[in-house]
Image (cartoon, helix red, strand yellow):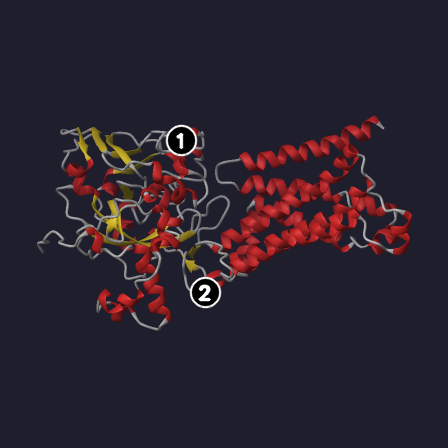
Amino acid sequence: MRIHRPTTILPSEITPRAVRDERRAVLKALGLGAGQLAIGGSAFGLLNTANAATSAAAPAASASRTKLVTRPSPYSTREAPNSYADITGYNNFYEFGLDKTDPAANAHTLKPRPWKVTIDGECDKPGTYDLDALIKPHALEDRIYRFRCVEAWSMVIPWVGFPLGDLLKRFAPNSRAKFVEFTTLMDPAQMPGQRRPVLDWPYREGLRMDEAMHPLAILAVGLYGEVLPNQNGAPLRLVVPWKYGFKNIKSIVRIRFTEKAPATAWNVAAPDEYGFFANVNPDVDHPRWSQARERRIGAGGGLFAAKIDTQPFNGYAAQVAGLYRGLDLKKWF
Amino acid sequence: MVLTPSREQARYGMLTRWDMLRYGLHVGLLVPLLLLGLGAFELAGQSLGPDPVETLLRELGWWAVTLLVAGLAVTPVRHWLKQAPLLRLRRPLGLWGFTYAVLHFTVYLVLDRQLAWAEILKDLIKRPYIMVGFAAVVLLLPLAATSTAWAMRKLGRRWQKLHRLAYLAAVLGVLHFLLQVKKDLTEPLIYAAVLGALLGWRVIRHRSK
């Protein structure tokens, strides 16, 4: 195992993401490939005139934009990630409003530190932990995953996180622990969208124990090598890449082991539209639209970009299809 | 305030204030379309955001439904304000409502479904909100085709009968709006309430005659 020394880079030396995105755009326009980018930022110092404040991502940038120490993961896709601006500017996070641009505009009211997480239910070592203490034992990994929204759009997102199963094991779930329930913060002062009864707040999600223990399922704390922005579910969110996006519950305050399948927010809201499993499946349509294809956000061609075929389990079938052997995926959608 | 054309204005083809208002309405309703067009090509600081097709669909659809409902508000408002010439604003509202509806439908066919006809046909058969939206666009076609003064003269009394289809088109448009919402029904329900009031006013007036 590689040992990583803590970074000696000062926060002030880190190029803001928005500036880097703009530099990339300039380099792209100049016809320079990704390989040439690797020769380092200093050679392109002249380009450091871009004004971060003009970027769409800038309003979301907070003081906590800290670089994380990460290592690569073999589970990452080689597909090109979406821009930081797209990932942080186009979100479904109803606690901050119903439009996809609302979270970026409104999520500044969330205070991701200090943050406490309670782990309880069917386990031998329940407790409440400060977030930093909770994640300290885990080495952070870059996990570049495909992200498929149930609304038939998709992105590629470079998360930073660690396997959910590694964390769950520390709390010694007992033999009655068949499911894991996750709960988002409930605080209308920080999450003004909770003042409206859009969903049965707080947002809840759940996984079967074997799904939760799968190495692809992670808890994410970062994005693009930096601390997770508020609108993406700071400070701690779930990422299960073979399921529709709404399973990836954000701003988690409680993780509970249960014997029975927990109630989940969207399933309670519309059981015929959103199942408990919510595995990405091109053969099972949403009642109002087909799931056979998806629109990749930021794909070349803009308005005229061809849609891409949706893959079973979002392209992770080789790793996870075995979890569902014998299960009627049309019935248990 | 005299808003009806004076004899001189009528005789010499001069512009009345109502004409100005009507032309202003045409220009005003062209503006959202121009902004969307600029956004589609990322010009003049306009942008459709990360999912441009979705933005186009939503914006064009919103304008179509809004203008169709606004068109049905003309007659009640005209009676309320006792301003007969208001009626002349109805055609611009209807024609632009039709234009936005057709563009909305075209974006669905070409950019969203990308002319995958099998998929489109399945949508039409399986999904009520698509069916309803499609029906609304189809109903608007004869109305747009007979919106000229010539057609009005030609059809005589039948013109009014035919153009009652506008009520049905608006109902279907609002229903389409309502059915496609993921969770928050507030906005389409407001539209439904306004449309209900506009149609209810007509029913009451008809009965009391």
Residue A328, picture quadrant: top left
Residue beneath disc 1: A194
Q: Name the disc covering residue A301, or none.
A: 2
Q: Name the disc covering residue A124, or none.
A: none
Give how far apart the Cα atoms at labels 2 and 1 are.
37 Å
User: Which quadrant, please, contains the N terminus of chain A?
Assistant: bottom left
Please check whether the numbered discs 2 and 1 fall on a single chain: yes
Give the x, y percent position of residue B80: 77, 32
Q: Is residue A199 above or below residue B122?
A: above
**Residue type pointed to by label 1:** Gln
Mark 2 — on which chain does it sit?
A
* Residue drawn at the location 46% of the way across and 47% of the way down: A285
Residue A296, picture quadrant: bottom left
Give the x, y percent position of residue A226: 24, 50
**Residue type pointed to by label 2:** Gly
* Residue drawn at the location 69% of the way across and 31% of the way down: B197
Q: Nearer the viewer, residue A70 or B26?
A: B26
Q: Secondary structure at mark 2?
A: loop
Mark 1 — on which chain does it sit?
A
Give the x, y percent position of residue A116: 22, 32
* Residue drawn at the location 21% of the way across and 69% of the way down: A39
Q: Nearer the viewer, residue A55 or A297?
A: A55
Disc 1 crowd rating (10 Å Cα; few below 14, some 14-19, many 20+) is: many
- Answer left or right for A2 relative to A94: left
Q: Is residue A81 above or below residue A92?
A: below
Q: Nearer the viewer, residue A202 or B95?
A: B95
Q: Secondary structure at mark 1?
A: helix
- Answer left or right for B36 relative to A131: right
Labels 2 and 1: the sequence-earlier one: 1
Tell me if residue A244 can be seen: no
Q: Is residue A179 above or below residue A61?
A: above
